Amino acid sequence: MRIDVITLFPDFIAQCAAFGVTGRAGERGLLSLHGWNPRDYAEGNYRRVDERPFGGGPGMVMLIDPLRAAIEAARAADPVPAKVIYLTPQGAPLTQAKARELAARERVILLCGRYEGIDERLIEAEVDEELSIGDYVLSGGELAAAVVVDAVARLQEGALSDAESAEQDSFEGGVLDCPHYTRPVEHELGRVPDVLLSGNHADIARWRRKESLGRTWQRRPDLLDEAALTQADHKLLDEYRARFAE
Ligand SMILES: CN(C)c1ccccc1CNc1ccc(C(N)=O)cn1
């Protein structure tokens, strides 16, 4: 998958993706990341990328032309067509389902705003989708872009070893992840649940599913409504809830 990021701080994005799973995905050729800086396409001695807002008010607005030129340069760098996604608090929420959908695409161009945002005419002319990573305001779209890069990189085939399988992740099956334990069995902080030491894989899978369902019920009941639960799941959840009924 190829991701082009339009940003005033290309190094920022490169650094975010340079480590761990995303770094490995890059080394394995599963993901290629390219930064395009609008300032490289800004005219005049001051190479302006922003200007004061019409109608007054605080802050600055990003100019159309440097952004437009950077987007065109990104498009021209690869024959594969790409959708432009603008990271903004006004965007549709990023979910695991959305990440999976993006991860299946061959190319994506991510547009990062700074200052108070971007001239609306550029958004209307060039932006295909607007995405938000949550209901809060950041000083720029770069952190949101880095989140998207990470979420799609780990979903690339071959990015995660079996052990790290993305399947068990929270939200993957629409429910939260179960608790995890490793050595030592006995610790001053407590003991590992016996079922995990039993070697009985059916019991272990059952316990994990019950814990996932139970946690989702306790922490994110909104997710539970969405998750397609089997009869067996409902039984596990009843057992989990019974724990609190005593
Ligand atoms: C500078 N601001 C406020 C701004 C204004 C408009 C667009 C982009 C930005 C860049 N900031 C962002 C970007 C994304 C998110 C998010 N929740 O995904 C939060 N903040």
Image (cartoon, rainbow, N blue to C red):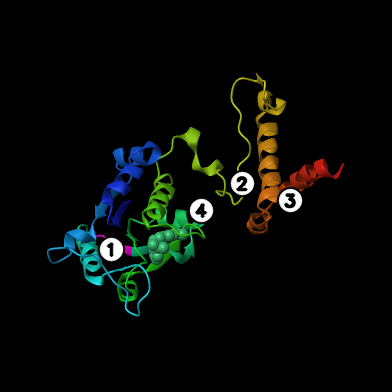
- Real-space Cα distance between discs 4 and 2? 12 Å
Residue at 38% x, 54% y is 145
- Real-space Cα distance between discs 3 and 4? 24 Å
| Among the two numbered marks 4 and 2 on one chain, the one whose residue lies closer to the N terminus | 4
- Real-space Cα distance between discs 2 and 3? 18 Å
- Real-space Cα distance between discs 4 and 1? 24 Å
* Disc 4 target residue: 96
The quarter of the image that holds ligand 1 is bottom left
* Disc 3 target residue: 231
| Among the two numbered marks 3 and 1 on one chain, the one whose residue lies closer to the N terminus | 1
The nearer-to-camera label among 3 and 4 is 4
The nearer-to-camera label among 2 and 3 is 2
Q: What secondary structure is the stretch in magenta mostly built from?
A: loop
**Hey, which quadrant is residue 85 in on the image?**
bottom left
Residues drawn in magenta: 79-83
Residue at 67% x, 49% y is 219
Q: Nearer the viewer, residue 183 or 133?
A: 133
Does the magenta-highlighted stretch encompass residue 222?
Answer: no
Crowding near pointer 1: few (<14 within 10 Å), some, many (20+)?
Answer: few
* Disc 2 target residue: 176
| Among the two numbered marks 2 and 3 on one chain, the one whose residue lies closer to the N terminus | 2
* Disc 1 target residue: 81
| Among the two numbered marks 2 and 1 on one chain, the one whose residue lies closer to the N terminus | 1
Residue 39 in the image, given as x and y percentages of width and height: 20, 60
Where 31 sits versus 228, above or below? Answer: above
**Type of residue at label 1?**
Pro
